Structure formats: structure tokens, C-alpha cells
Image (cartoon, rainbow, N blue to C red):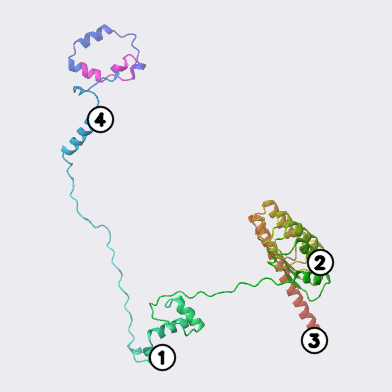
């Protein structure tokens, strides 16, 4: 029981003093060591008495203490090992498996073919050339393989360890400029000429905005031109708005390419929405515009417009959001399936009609 819980009201302190006076000095020190350190009747300095018997060595000196510990560590003897170290191998020792013995077939030694004499007399370079012709790409380098494909006799095949030397750079002429006459094209479109079924104005830099609008205005009433390409001509939004009107009026255009221009997201969404009126367009390309990131709202608007189109088969546009991208992919796949089923039904109807004619 703790001293806090004991009741000392009936204790006779005179008897306690008499008992303590009969104890020796050693017994008093032993009794003082057994005092409860939580006794509130004792001062804090007496609850845990100092048991150090050495004389004080003076003030604290860190350098002197470190030197004393270092000397003590050097002078003290190391602990003796209880057990001497012995190298022991525990577990199973790995032994490599025996090599498989190759079976000998002495009956095949006398078998000869017509190729033995040819191969025995061929040089190493000729064998390398034969390996390249047979397509053993692991035995020859890239230069030897391509030389064998092209049947180039000017290449020295060398041996098995021949280095693949660099080939001479082949000059490829640049693509010629687009020579399409814009004025003549506008005239043919306005006259609805039957010979003009495809118009390519890609990469022509000097087309004015007025000429672009004239071309698009002429396409509103044209019934012969089915492919229109106006990529990389620096087309702005003001011209693209006339394309929206043209798509709502034209019923013969199948392919429209206006990539790499200066269109914004809202105009791109309007172009996709304009294809819903007639639904005759099957290929629409709108990628690489000024607005690299259309935004989630515009992409959802485009996806909703494409989901209502039942004829569009190819759409060239980059979606940054997964939802619109997956939605457009499903719609295009559905349109391809519908086109395939339509073609099969037409083929079946034609075959059934031919069968009825043969019976008559």
C-alpha cells in the first residue's frame, strides 16, 4: 500500500524516534534507500538520495572526458569469442545438370546431295549472300539484307562479321507546289461543270478571303463536285461560317477537308452541327486548328452532333476528353455496320431478283 493511502493519525512518533536511535549508521542508510519516492511527507531532495561515494572531480570538461573514454576503450581487453569462426556450408550444393548427349546417326554420313559440292566450294561471302536472300536476318547485317532484296551486285557482302557501313544519302526532291488555278476553279464551280468532281486547294497561301468565300458560295448550288480540300490555306472563322451555310444547302458533297487552318472550337462545333441537315457527308476532316484544346463543353457538343449523323464514316478531329472520343468512335462504328448491312441486303435482293428472272 502506498504511503498516501495509509492513515498516520494514531502513530506514536516518540516510539519511532526511539527505534531509529537504536539503529546503526549502515542500517539507517539501508532504511533511507527503501523510502517510497512518491511520499509527499518527504522533501523532494530526500526522496531519491545521492548514492555516489566518489569525490567530485571538478567542473565539466568535454575534451578531457572524450580523451578518458578513448583511452579506456584502447586499454580495455576485447571480449573473448565464445566460439571460433569456422566456414560451414549449409543446404544443398548446386550441381550443374549433365549436358544432353547428342545422338549420332552414322547411317546419314554417306548421304550426299547435289548442294554439297556447291556449298563446299562456295566462299564465305557467297554463303552470306545466300543467307540474306533466304531471309536469315539473324546471320547478316542490315546492309547485306537490303542488298540481297534489291539484287544489287555493286554491294560487297563480306564475311559473317562484316560491319554495316553507312549508305549514301539519297536526295528526295520536294513536293511540287499546288498549281491549281483558283480563278478557273471558281468559274467551273459557278458553271456547275460536270468535269470538276474533285477540287484540291491545299497549301495555297495566296488565296484571299474573298476568293475563299466565292468558292464556298459556288459550292452551295454545285451538284457535281464531291470532294473539296482546303487544308492549310489560313482560313479564318469568318470564311468557315460560310461553310456552315454551304453544308446546309449542298446535297452532293461527300468529302470535306479543312485541316490546318485558323478555326476556333465554336466554329468547328457549328460545322459538325451543319452536317445534320442533309446527312450526305461521309468524310469530314477538321484537325490541327488554331484551337489545339477545344474544351470539354465544345467536345461534348461535337459528340452530340455526330451521334445524330447516320452517314458520316470518317471524322478527323482530336478529342482530349475520353467521353466524347468514345462516343464518336461508337457512332462511326455503328455507321460502318449499317453501311455493311445495307450492302448485304442490296446484294441479297439483287440475287433474289436474278433468280426470279431465271425461273421465268
Do we see residue 250 in this rendering? no
Residue tagged by mark 3? Answer: 358
Horizontal and vertical percent position of residue 304:
73, 56
Residue at the disc numbered 4: 62
The disc, 4 or 1, on the residue closer to the chain's N-terminal end is: 4
Secondary structure under badge 2?
helix
Front tag of 2 and 1: 2
Q: Is residue 315 above or below residue 135?
A: above
Q: Quadrant of residue 165?
A: bottom left
Q: Which residue is mark 1?
A: 115
Task: Determine if the magenta segment contains residue 31.
Answer: yes
Asked if 61 appears above or below 5 in the picture, the reply is below
Asked whether the beta carbons under mark 4 and mark 1 sit within 8 Å of each other, the answer is: no
> As displayed, is residue 112 above or below residue 8?
below
Q: Earlier in the sequence, mark 1 or mark 3?
A: 1
Residue at left offset 24%, top offset 9%: 17
Seen from the viewer's position, the closer of residues 311 and 99 is 311
* Mark pair 1, 3: CA separation: 61 Å
Q: Residue furthest top?
A: 14
Q: Which residues are magenta?
A: 28-45
Q: State how far apart marks 2 and 1 are (Cα).
A: 73 Å
x, y percent for residue 358: 80, 86
- Location of residue 246 in the rendering, given as x and y in whole percent from the top left corner: 80, 63
Amino acid at each position: 500500500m502506498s504511503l498516501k493511502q495509509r492513515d498516520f493519525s494514531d502513530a506514536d512518533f516518540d516510539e519511532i524516534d526511539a527505534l531509529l536511535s537504536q539503529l546503526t549508521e549502515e542500517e539507517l542508510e539501508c532504511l533511507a534507500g527503501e523510502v517510497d519516492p512518491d511520499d509527499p511527507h518527504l522533501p523532494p531532495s530526500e526522496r531519491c538520495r545521492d548514492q555516489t561515494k566518489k569525490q567530485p572531480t571538478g567542473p565539466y570538461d568535454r575534451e578531457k572526458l572524450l580523451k578518458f573514454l578513448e583511452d579506456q576503450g584502447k586499454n580495455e581487453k576485447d571480449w573473448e569469442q565464445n566460439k571460433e569462426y569456422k566456414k560451414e556450408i549449409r543446404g544443398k550444393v548446386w550441381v550443374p545438370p549433365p549436358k544432353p548427349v547428342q545422338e549420332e546417326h552414322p547411317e546419314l554420313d554417306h548421304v550426299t546431295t547435289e548442294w554439297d559440292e556447291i556449298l563446299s566450294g562456295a566462299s564465305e561471302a557467297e554463303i552470306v549472300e545466300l543467307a540474306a536472300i533466304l531471309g536469315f536476318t539473324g546471320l547478316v547485317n542490315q546492309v547485306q539484307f537490303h542488298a540481297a532484296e534489291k539484287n544489287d551486285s555493286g554491294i560487297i557482302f563480306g564475311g559473317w562479321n562484316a560491319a554495316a557501313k553507312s549508305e549514301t544519302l539519297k536526295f528526295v526532291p520536294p513536293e511540287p507546289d499546288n498549281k491549281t488555278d483558283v480563278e478557273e476553279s471558281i468559274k467551273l464551280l459557278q458553271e456547275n461543270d460536270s468535269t470538276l468532281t474533285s477540287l484540291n486547294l491545299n497549301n495555297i497561301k495566296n488565296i484571299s478571303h474573298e476568293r475563299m468565300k466565292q468558292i464556298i458560295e459556288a459550292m452551295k448550288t454545285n451538284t457535281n463536285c464531291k470532294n473539296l480540300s482546303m487544308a492549310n490555306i489560313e482560313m479564318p472563322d469568318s470564311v468557315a461560317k460560310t461553310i456552315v451555310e454551304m453544308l446546309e444547302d449542298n446535297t452532293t458533297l461527300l468529302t470535306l477537308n479543312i485541316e490546318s487552318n485558323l478555326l476556333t472550337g465554336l466554329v468547328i462545333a457549328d460545322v459538325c452541327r451543319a452536317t445534320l441537315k442533309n446527312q450526305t457527308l461521309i468524310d469530314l476532316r477538321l484537325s490541327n486548328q488554331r484551337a489545339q484544346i477545344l474544351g470539354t463543353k465544345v467536345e461534348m457538343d461535337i459528340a452530340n452532333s455526330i451521334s445524330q449523323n447516320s452517314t458520316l464514316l470518317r471524322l478527323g478531329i482530336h478529342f482530349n476528353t475520353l467521353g466524347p472520343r468514345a462516343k464518336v468512335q461508337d457512332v462511326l462504328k455503328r455507321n460502318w455496320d449499317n453501311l455493311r448491312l445495307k450492302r448485304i441486303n442490296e446484294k441479297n435482293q439483287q440475287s433474289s431478283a436474278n433468280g426470279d428472272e431465271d425461273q421465268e
